[in-house]
Amino acid sequence: MLQKQKIKESFVVLNEKGLHTRPATELVKCVSNFKAQVTLHYQSLSVNAKSLLGILMLAAARGAKIRIEAEGDDADLCVKALIDLAKNKFHMNY
């Protein structure tokens, strides 16, 4: 039986206004394309990366380091896509 992958990585929020509604929506859209269970950790909070409300609860400002924990068959692909998205400022062009 195959063992599920568990991937741990992190990214820094580069957006001027932090992880507000629009970038959080892009994050949820990205993660929702994968089967992996993804949890984001910031300070003492841990939230489901597929939950917009959860991500907004992090109140992550610019420069915040967010830890990612993903588990599942496509966890590695999901984490890579998420890190690429963060590096591209969640497609925000302001």
Image (cartoon, grey):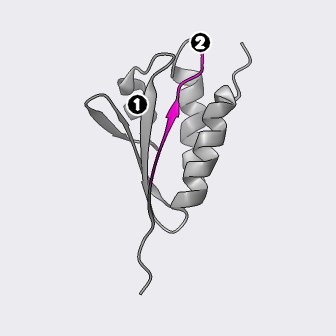
Quadrant assignment, res 67: top left
Indicate the amino acid at tag 1: Leu
The prevailing secondary structure element of the residues shown in magenta is strand
* Relative horizontal placement of residue 67, taking residue 12 as reference (left or right): left
Q: Picture coordinates of residue 68 (x, y %)?
A: 44, 44
Label 1: state its secondary structure: helix
* Residue designated by label 2: 16
Up the image or down, 67 lies above or below 65; here it is below
Outermost residue to the right: 93
Q: Earlier in the sequence, mark 1 or mark 2?
A: 2
Residue at the spot 56% in from the left edge and 32% down from the top edge: 25
- Measured in 3D between alpha carbons, the distance from the residue under mark 1 to the one under mark 2, in whole angstroms, is 20 Å
Outermost residue to the bottom: 1
* Residue designated by label 1: 53
Q: Which residues are magenta?
A: 8-15
Q: Nearer the viewer, residue 22 or 42?
A: 42
Placement of the N terminus among the 4 image quadrants: bottom left
Please indicate, yes or no, whether residue 20 appears anywhere in the rendered image: yes
Tell me if residue 67 is in the magenta stretch: no
Q: Picture coordinates of residue 10 (x, y %)?
A: 48, 40
